[in-house]
Image (cartoon, coloured by chain):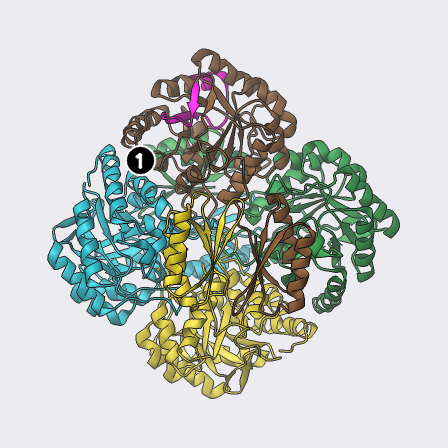
Chain colours: A yellow, B cyan, C green, D brown
Amino acid sequence: MIVILSPQASKSDIDEVTANLKERGYGVHVSQGVEKTIVGVIGAHDDEKLLVAEQLSSLAYVERVVPILKPFKVVSHEFHPDKTIVKVNGVDIGGQKVIVMAGPCSVESEEQTIEVARAVKAAGASILRGGAFKPSTSPYSFHGLGEDALKMLAAARELTGMPIITEVMDTRDVELVCKYADILQIGTRNMANYSLLTEVGNARKPVMLKRGMASTIEEWLQAAEYIANQGNYDIILCERGIRTFETYTRNTFDVSAIPTVLGLSHLPIIADPSHGTGRHALVPPVAKAAVAAGADGLMIEVHPQPEKALKDGAQSLTPNNFDQMMKDISAVARAVGRYI
Amino acid sequence: MIVILSPQASKSDIDEVTANLKERGYGVHVSQGVEKTIVGVIGAHDDEKLLVAEQLSSLAYVERVVPILKPFKVVSHEFHPDKTIVKVNGVDIGGQKVIVMAGPCSVESEEQTIEVARAVKAAGASILRGGAFKPSTSPYSFHGLGEDALKMLAAARELTGMPIITEVMDTRDVELVCKYADILQIGTRNMANYSLLTEVGNARKPVMLKRGMASTIEEWLQAAEYIANQGNYDIILCERGIRTFETYTRNTFDVSAIPTVLGLSHLPIIADPSHGTGRHALVPPVAKAAVAAGADGLMIEVHPQPEKALKDGAQSLTPNNFDQMMKDISAVARAVGRYI
Amino acid sequence: MIVILSPQASKSDIDEVTANLKERGYGVHVSQGVEKTIVGVIGAHDDEKLLVAEQLSSLAYVERVVPILKPFKVVSHEFHPDKTIVKVNGVDIGGQKVIVMAGPCSVESEEQTIEVARAVKAAGASILRGGAFKPSTSPYSFHGLGEDALKMLAAARELTGMPIITEVMDTRDVELVCKYADILQIGTRNMANYSLLTEVGNARKPVMLKRGMASTIEEWLQAAEYIANQGNYDIILCERGIRTFETYTRNTFDVSAIPTVLGLSHLPIIADPSHGTGRHALVPPVAKAAVAAGADGLMIEVHPQPEKALKDGAQSLTPNNFDQMMKDISAVARAVGRYI
Amino acid sequence: MIVILSPQASKSDIDEVTANLKERGYGVHVSQGVEKTIVGVIGAHDDEKLLVAEQLSSLAYVERVVPILKPFKVVSHEFHPDKTIVKVNGVDIGGQKVIVMAGPCSVESEEQTIEVARAVKAAGASILRGGAFKPSTSPYSFHGLGEDALKMLAAARELTGMPIITEVMDTRDVELVCKYADILQIGTRNMANYSLLTEVGNARKPVMLKRGMASTIEEWLQAAEYIANQGNYDIILCERGIRTFETYTRNTFDVSAIPTVLGLSHLPIIADPSHGTGRHALVPPVAKAAVAAGADGLMIEVHPQPEKALKDGAQSLTPNNFDQMMKDISAVARAVGRYI
């Protein structure tokens, strides 16, 4: 940690801040430049440093505090140099194979769920997605069928053999969702719901953590650290677009987040071009881009009749379109040394 | 709702979409322009319309669906023309008096809490704020003292007579926090935690709802609608800055959100310049700006020794600075026909 | 154009607005819904409509004006269904071949320029890039060698046969730059410099128009319309990242802009992952993503010794890294039916 | 400047970077922490440091380079502690009086200009604004009357005695605009048009520099530095809103930029709530907020018939509304120790 003092800092200000730091057990190194004085702070734990940084910033003669260490540890490459492979009922996420999770945004009925499950499996998907508890901006929208939907997903798993992933939104539902799901999904609106992160960190199920729509990559990795910090290392990250001024797309899909995360962390990362773009016509090209950039997998919304979907119809592919997209992506995956 | 068809839409496409809409009971009006065909959709409930908009967007020949009605109702001015005044133990929020809520970011000890409570009351604050459950980006930071902190706040209320406001982050804690707090605070990270909104909507306590750091004003009012929809109309909105590309301030305080909300909704709105700027030197000028723009109140972080605060030291005022700021704000409040 | 009136609009307000519109020669259609009145406006030119929209918005009883037509014409797919191929000295931009433009950010010397030109040509680049006039955030940074640099680029073209592209920043320099360059580049900071757009619209050279770092796709296409409106249709668009809250990358590369532009316009679009990410390690994966998403070309910064570059060293590839990247991209291009 | 090396940096990497820096004449201080090595770089000019920072960032073993000094000098408080007062024909901008610049967005006719000039002067405005050269997103919109408009503004000055401010967009027009205008305005789209900044830096007229809609405060002050670097110190800054995800307002007015700029720089700063909000109903409350936050002035669009304005009707006040706003602002100005 480096403390940059303002040009107005007096000798006694410098003495005060160094005494304050030494008192707390830090090593201190003062460097007086032509215009500014800089105080290097050595030793102590990262978490304490964050606190000290905040506190020092409150002093009138401190201009800025610059942290040196990254704010996440367990999920960093430095902590664990080998890529993590999350294993889910025989499906490896983070290996050579690009894993595709597909299914309807919301589970609407057992027939619909099974129909889509069979279609996406035939096209090459490995995992079935489907919403039982659905976050909605409006209180008057559809919120999902709850446990009934979980049972329908389980029925589809029974018939197709595909593991299932579904979102959990409430700390009180974690136990229930764990009874049915193979992967717990944390949605974008709950990326900074620390109670929920702690709860799924205690669950014995893999967790897929979507990026918060206004979260930096560092904050996202810190959210993953919450889960890991409880002892659950089976974490998959999912880039799903961030909020920007552009209004043509629902979100701006941040493709560079994929190689960035792969460089900073050992966790696998997948891409959700359905939410990332919000427009079905953009899903296939952005899916190809994500695989070319190194994504370990994709999450795609598929609905037999998007024009009758109870949620997110605008961004859902039909089974036919999905099938075509899988063929195209297979070629891209091979071009970057992967397969689908 | 208006459906704009793409120039490629054929006669049979137009027939399909109008038949589809009529079948669902909507009135339909087709207007053929020189370049585009537009379909007006009349009748039916808003929530259904949102769903239909999504579904229609999935059709290849639909270019865009434009909603006409605002996506919130109960919290809108049209629904309830008179300004709502939230009454909390003799304090009226939304009336002529600008209400100031002040106190430490986190409750650290009973002494600290009482010391700050007495200081801010003497300076003119009406409500005591203090964090018992604290959201933190890092899992290694301080997370608050929990129920112990709630007891300390209650002790400070006992001594000073000031009502207390504190954040609740977990649906499982709502009952506990209700036992102590006079106002429940929903933080920026939980603005779209719909389970939590529903839960505090069922509580019989006023709720202060902070704007999500990446939420539009419309989404924020929809979040308030979640609470109101459960029957709890005692809602106070709080503008606390949004996330932008600017890095000098922690957030960008959106001052125009204040008159915007006052124009769209009957709910009172207060301002949090401490989080809005993240820098103590900017708190007083932005607080004055908020009051000049029409804010019904302020929420300010005050700490006796910001350089030793366990949280948010950089943006906390000392009791002395707070006292000075209150005098300055009093003049601004009078200039806009209010008092403090 | 559709005018949505506020619920407070009276009968006489409605009469006023319709009379006002009819007087200007528009067809008018009034639709009275349960809660709101909507006025459809038919006929008249788009440009007039924009003006009328602004004017109507100033009326107290008008809630919102919704434009129906896209705000660009000549560059739209509707105007010109076939893809535009920009031909530059035997290089076709917008065809099956993915065109790579590469070279140093700034031209520093004739030796450096020729060295890089030979290296990038050997690796498969088709066009040489190099800055003669350089925009810099700081007045104290390097601003380019001006006409001397243009001569060095011309010398490199002489030796390698590669056409050259270079930026023009000032209306007064357009004539000079046209004397040397094969393609005129408009940089991100000048995307909305309408005097400059008009000037290059009058030049008889192809123009590459970078997206403004805070411009929507619609605004970008309107900027292209400025150039086309002067009669210069040889326009290449270049996505180079937009400004967001994410600080890890210099910009957020908007990969979905590529298929979006290809859907809305007939103009070719290329990608600049060097500025899009600002970090050399992210350039190859994002370049692959852009090609997978359908980009017609790439613009890449290459410097023999990035640690001694006078500009943008952090994002420049060495010739060796560039050569490796070209091999990798070749495979991706083939996977999407293109070649390099 | 501080260079943070990655944990993988070897002894020879550290030697290389320090030798490289010493060779260029910098003082170097190496500090080996438990996890990372940090290299402090002392001496040399700021501009060179920016270059070195870029160059060092290209090295694989360099994780990050942290600048210590602010990237602007002449416009900083450290360089010139006293507040700058820009004097324009007897009007002092930056003193106790809050200066109001008002007038139509575009000059449309001599009658309109004189009518508005008289009305705003009667209401208390000090400077007349009016556009002669107008930037427009669409090539088909109104672009201003050019020199004719400048003559109309001069005629209004003759009659009212008010100095005039108008925008210049093209380096070739600076001389012409200087013949008529008392203050040259640089618009938001040209804040980073460095050729234009240099040109007005050479003019002997005060310059008002609007913030780029996607520019950080630091970049804005660097743009001012461009002007000052040519010897023109009569610079007024103007906050006019930044681009964010919020769509209700045209821009997000960044009120905290006002005290931030006043803290970092000696230059006066004014506020433009017309463009900052884009909605006439929000102009008065945001204007009051700006004055309460310390703005040295306001720029307001006034049009006798906004519903017939050739530009920006939606955000223009009528003379009556302007008159009322001036009365309200006068009270706020007095509350913060200023007058109007």
The residue under the point 75% across, 46% down is: C107
Residue A257 vertical position relative to residue D159 in the rendered view, above or below? below
Q: Is D108 included in the stretch rendered in magenta?
A: yes
In this view of the protein, which residue sits in the foreground, C37 or B19?
C37
Other residues around mark 1 within 10 Å, as few (<14) / some (14–19) / many (≥20)? few
Image side of residue B213 versus residue C170, left or right? left
The residue under the point 26% across, 56% down is: B104
Q: Quadrant of residue B48?
A: bottom left
The range drawn in magenta is D91-115
- Residue A236: x and y in percent read 50, 75
- Residue D127: x and y in percent read 44, 22
Identify the amino acid type marked 1.
Answer: Lys
Please, what secondary structure does the residue beneath circle 1 have?
helix
Q: Quadrant of residue C326?
A: bottom right
The residue under the point 61% across, 48% down is: D50
In this view of the protein, which residue sits in the foreground, D310 or D59?
D59
Q: Which residue is mark 1?
A: C11
Q: Quadrant of the C terminus of chain B?
A: top left
Image side of residue B68 versus residue C317, left or right? left
In this view of the protein, which residue sits in the foreground, C52 or A46?
A46
Q: Is B71 included in the stretch rendered in magenta?
A: no
In this view of the protein, which residue sits in the foreground, A89 or B188?
B188
